[in-house]
Image (tube, rainbow, N blue to C red):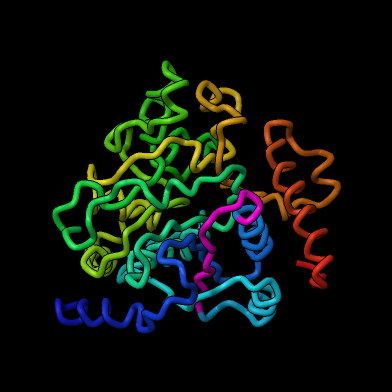
Amino acid sequence: MTANDNNQAVSTSNPDKKRVVESSKVWTALLTNTSYLKGTLTLDYSLKRVKSAYPLIVLYTDSLPPEAHHALDARHIPKKHVPYLVPKSQRDYSNDPRFYDCWTKLTPFSLVEYERVVQLDADMLVLRNMDELMDIELDSRSDSMNSNRVFAATHACACNPCKKPHYPKHWVPKNCAYTSQHSSPKRAQAKGAPCTAGIGLPNGGLQVVNPSAETYGTILRALNSTDASSYDFADQSLLGDVFRGRWVSLPYVYNGLKFLRWDGVHDAIWRDERVKNMHYGMNPKPWEETEEMRKKRDARDETHEWWWEINDERLKEEKTHGVDDGW
């Protein structure tokens, strides 16, 4: 791709810059199919439940089927079409197919009609108000090329607690940023480890962004380079590479990956009462569980019940408004 091609990509990647909501600060979540629809609906409900002052916008691609649109519309959840991003050299993610969709989670950087975008994964559940993310300091988007605070995120956990054989060999507890905080659990509730700690990789589940055409142009150039095929973890690998040492590290409470809580992983710093946002990374997702699976569930995943309680509350409330579509 030439420089001119890339400039054209930047200008057409967000062709409609009209806001779909009045707020200049928004939450976003990507939805490409119905497998994450229940999660998205409950995420939206959980934000409203904690009285967030900011709306959630669902970013959807061409692949989203009509039934998903109907479910979003029935609940008056605003949405915006975004292009499906694919790198020039696509890596084989057959061991983790979810990563094929993850490139598109980079599109919030292009939403220049908004002052602040906080991208959330659809398998998250907001337990406590975290509107402060809309106001944390990031460098001006007009000077993003020289910024040392391009975006904010929590660290990726490099422990590989599920022992996936295809994960990089250096993904072990001693190289994890969270391990470096075990001796100071009180501090870990409020401060993230330095962004260069451990493997220095952000988790892509939550990104706090000041959208910028310049920053998005940098991302697209990386996406269309041959180096993109070397990224083990799609969007988060790209961000960690291109902006290494130039992002703001947030404490785990904003992206509480469920396995951080497991015995022997990062239970040394985990505090149930401090977590603001649960992230149900790794399968199964709570909504994929049958009643039989719930009865036999491993005790370490009792956080799934937190999701079910709020989801059941959502369904009950929706019925009072005449919405009962099975989602």
200 part of magenta stretch: no
Residue 165 or 38: which is nearer the viewer? 38
Is 277 on the left or on the right of 93, as rendered? right
Q: In this view, does 320 lie to the left or right of 209?
A: right
In this rendering, the answer to whether 178 lies above or below 10 is above
Question: In screen coordinates, is 217 left or right of 112?
Answer: left
Rendered location of residue 316, percent (x, y): 82, 58
In the image, which residues are magenta? 48-61
In the displayed structure, does residue 111 sit left or right of residue 257?
Answer: left
213 vs 173, nearest the viewer: 213
Considering the image in quadrants, where does the C terminus appear?
Answer: bottom right
Q: Position of residue 124 (x, y in %)?
A: 58, 51
Which image quadrant is residue 195 in?
A: top left
Q: In this view, does 10 lie above or below 140?
A: below
- The residue sitting at 20% across, 78% down in the picture is 7
Q: Give the residue drawn at x 51%, y 27%.
A: 266
Q: In which quarter of the image is the N terminus?
A: bottom left
Task: Say which of 282 and 114 sits in front.
Answer: 114
Count of numbered labels shown in the rendering = 0
Q: Give coordinates of residue 264: x percent, y percent.
A: 55, 23
Give residue 116's quadrant in the image. Answer: bottom left
Picture coordinates of residue 62 (x, y %)?
Answer: 52, 81
Pick out the residue farthest to the top. 183
* Residue name at image x 42 percent, y 29 percent: 178
Whether 49 is among the magenta residues is yes
